[in-house]
Image: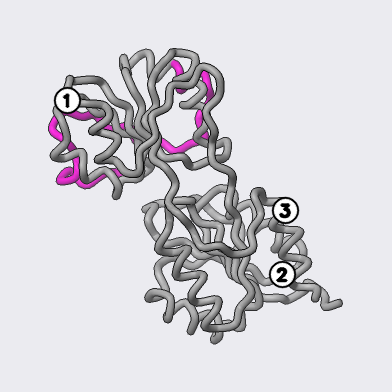
Amino acid sequence: MTALSDRNILILGGTADARKLAVALAGKGTNVTLSLAGVTLSPRDQGVPTRVGGFGGANGLAVHLREQRVELLIDATHPYATTISRNAEIAAAKSNTPILALRRPAWRPEAGDIWYEADDLKAALATIGSEPKRLFVALGRKEIAPLATAPPHHYVIRSVDPIDPALLPPMRETILERGPFSLSAERELLERLQIEAIICKNSGGTAAYAKLRAARALGLPVHMLNRPPLPDVPQGSDVETVIRMACEYLQT
């Protein structure tokens, strides 16, 4: 058995789970570096050594893994960060680095939910139709470009960072907030803004789930963007499972 002390771990993050995972593994004596893509302009303090920015694709990440003598790569990115996840799988193979993934389970509709699933934003908008509605949009600021030429709904768009005005539809208002959000706050928001439907991604987890509970209580339809396929690598569905798997990898 090899001690965990001073083992080098690189975590590809950007989620609350990634931050929790990094802090927990650092507490076990490992050398953890958390990597952020730089999408969020003002990220929270991560509690561990952090790098920001890309690696230059899969080849660049493979070089980094070799040069930094990374002994375990953990993909704990957002379920929709497909490019990063694919690059991680390729880089791990090129550099012969073990890889794990933290894949939190997708949300599932419950009794009372009114869900319409779509593969992308354009498909979701087509399902909603052209009759003007007040829509609450909970997507990343770089994912809303189709709204600029979408049907003339009134869009309420929530984002962590300011959005490029060129990406915004004519009839809109923006809300700059960072979750997690409570059920009471989400319900009050949806009622006050007279929202008629929600567009969001199936992110899973608890931080953004309150809006779905609020929609259920208010009888609002939710237009849910399906998750894209991700690489099939060893994975756990929660932080505790991935911690256990990481320790097993590093002790062999």
Query: Which mark, residue 30?
Result: 2
> Residue at position x 17%, y 25% from top?
130
Q: In which quarter of the image is residue 3?
A: bottom right
Report the residue at 41% width, 40% height from top: 201
Q: Give the class, few, some or many, for how many residues have Cα within 10 Å of label 3's Cα (few <14, many ≥20).
A: few
Sooner in the amino-acid sequence: mark 2 or mark 1: 2
- Identity of the residue furthest to the bottom in this view: 67
The residue mark sitting in front, 3 or 1, is 1
Q: Relative to the observer, which residue lies in front, 39 or 230?
A: 230
Q: Where is residue 28 in the image (x, y as percent from the top left)?
A: 77, 63
Type of the residue with mark 2: Thr
Which residue is under mark 3?
241
Q: Quadrant of the C terminus?
A: bottom right
Relative to 105, does residue 116 appear above or below in the rendering?
A: above
Query: In the rendered structure, which amino acid carries the disc numbered 3?
Result: Thr
User: Label for residue 130?
Assistant: 1
Q: Are marks 2 and 1 in contact (CB under 8 Å)?
A: no
* x and y percentages locating residue 181 in the rendered image: 50, 30
Amino acid at pointer 1? Ser
**Earlier sequence position, callout 2 versus callout 3:** 2
Could you give the CA–CA distance between mark 2 and mark 1, rounded to whole angstroms? 54 Å
